[in-house]
Image (cartoon, rainbow, N blue to C red):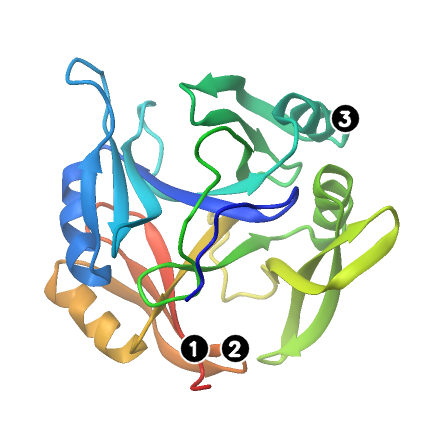
Amino acid sequence: MGERDHYEHGVPCWVDHASGDPDGAAAFYSVLLGWETQDTMPPDAPGRYLMCTLDGKEVAAISTQPMEGVQPAWNTYVAVDDADAAAASAAEAGGTVLAGPFDVFDAGRMAVVQDPAGAVVSLWQAGVHSGAALVNEPGSLAWNELTTRDVEGSERFYGAVFGWRTEAMEFGGGRYFTWYRRGDGTPDPETAMGGMMPMDGEIWPSDLPPHWMTYFAVEDADATAARCRELGGAVAVAPFDTPAGRIAVLNDPVGAVVSVIQMPAA
């Protein structure tokens, strides 16, 4: 099992879904991925924050989007040792601090930053909540991927903020990059932090902004895509095979985009 109770600096650690309809999102993902949900906010709170669990382990959250006119989305959080220092590094590297840093009760301290190309990512300094307690198992977080039109600028920004580096590979006739963590200039053992997909070519709509994509592991990508349709969602990209596994891109019923991946058999 991919159980986790700690995340090192620079490791994606958590995801949450924000929309104007958290109950609708919770109903969808509870069936699609087998989650149970429980609201963690006080009854008089202006918004909801539904903790999603799988076999009793926290895997993600579903929340109320606090700002009007913001597209529903899955948000990626990266673990940092010091949220204030990481936010300052993001600003120095050309990014924009959109929110925080601020404390989230005793759970941790966070900030929301936008990279120079426009993708938004959250910084998480753990308190009592370190992040997802289960990963890389069906129904849990499996991968985080930056989709961007500025590969070189993204390499500089995320390298400065998280100490990441990239390795390139050929993928589907184009390029794909994997993020790795490095320390003090020397690469750590080859542990992938996530991916980066260049928005090259006409396949990418011109009005699609750079973003971080969330991937959840599933037992059967085709069955999950079919179930998504039954639950009122849509399949944006039909299941297809990759060296990493079989992938589908889904639109949930409240308007967010998410990917699922069926890992290769061991």
Tell me, yes or no, whether the two marked residues, 3 and 1, touch with CB atoms within 8 Å. Answer: no
Q: Is residue 210 visible?
A: no
Q: Residue at x 19, y 59 (%)?
A: 233
Earlier in the chain: of badge 2 and badge 1, it is: 2
Tell me, yes or no, whether the two marked residues, 3 and 2, touch with CB atoms within 8 Å. Answer: no
Mark sitting on residue 263: 1
Tell me how far mark 2 sits from mark 1, CA to CA: 7 Å
Which quarter of the rendering shows the N terminus? bottom left
Tell me how far mark 3 sits from mark 1, CA to CA: 38 Å
| Extreme residue toward the bottom, this view | 265
Residue type for callout 2 = Ala
Q: Secondary structure at mark 3?
A: helix
Q: Which residue is mark 3?
A: 92
x and y percentages locating residue 105 in the rendered image: 40, 18
| Image quadrant assignment for residue 187 | bottom right
Tell me how far mark 3 sits from mark 2, CA to CA: 35 Å
Earlier in the chain: of badge 3 and badge 1, it is: 3
| 86 lies above or below 146 | above
- Classed neighbour count for the residue bearing mark 3: other residues with Cα under 10 Å, few (<14), some (14–19), many (≥20): few
Please state if 84 lies on the left or on the right of 44 as rendered: right
Observer-nearest of 215 and 94 = 215
x and y percentages locating residue 231 in the rendered image: 12, 60
Q: Residue at x 31, y 29 (%)?
A: 65
- Classed neighbour count for the residue bearing mark 2: other residues with Cα under 10 Å, few (<14), some (14–19), many (≥20): few
Residue type for callout 1 = Met
Q: Residue at x 53, y 65 (%)?
A: 202
Q: Which residue is mark 2?
A: 244
| 93 lies above or below 16 | above
Q: Secondary structure at mark 1?
A: loop
x and y percentages locating residue 150 in the rendered image: 68, 50
Please state if 206 lies on the left or on the right of 82 as rendered: left
